[in-house]
Image (cartoon, helix red, strand yellow):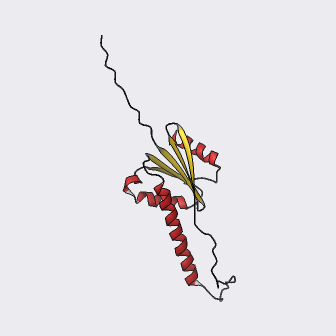
Amino acid sequence: MKFNVYQKTIEMKNQIGIWVDTKKAVIISLKENETSIKTLESAIEHRERFAGEKNQMGRFGEQSFEQEKHKDNKFKNQERLFLKEILSEIGGVDSIVLFGPAYVKNHLEKEIKSHRDISNKLVGVVTTDNMTKNQMSEWVNNYYH
């Protein structure tokens, strides 16, 4: 008797979870039963003060709208650069889940959806509390399994 033997190649999925807030992004990658963690620090500045800015802002006091607009634009630009840095780290993935406590994950979701090559790989966006890296890794493992 002769048997035909077929060899199946099982493609290992590259699944990632991204925990993100305004201070950092933690990218947890699951591939071939191995977990790797990479942290990207954010350059987003908070509560920046400018020279000449008054500490007292009363109802009828001096209003500094130009400086506020400048601060807001600077914050948005820093956030946009941070999101692009995250996207540059996630090429070649099969699925992405975003999680974390901050609104930044929603901005990252919009950024991912605007890129055709990875928009269909987004499988979830979940609001979670602050976590340690071990808790993040466990959360991603539980999410995919």
Percent x, y for residue 98?
Answer: 52, 52
Q: Is residue 126 visible?
A: no
Residue 70 in which image quadrant: bottom right
Is the N terminus in the top left, top right, bottom left or bottom right quadrant?
top left
Percent x, y for residue 13?
Answer: 45, 40
- Indicate whether 103 appears above or below 4: below
* Residue at left offset 55%, top offset 44%: 36
* Residue at left offset 52%, top offset 62%: 82
Residue 54 in which image quadrant: bottom right
- Indicate whether 113 appears above or below 75: above
How many numbered marks have been drawn onto this rendered protein structure?
A: 0
- Indicate whether 30 appears above or below 107: above
Instruction: Specify whether 50 is left or right of 12.
Output: right
Q: Residue furthest top?
A: 1
Percent x, y for residue 59?
Answer: 66, 86
* Residue at left offset 60%, top offset 69%: 45
Percent x, y for residue 99?
Answer: 55, 53
Q: Is residue 91 visible?
A: yes
User: Camera-side residue: 118 or 31?
Assistant: 31
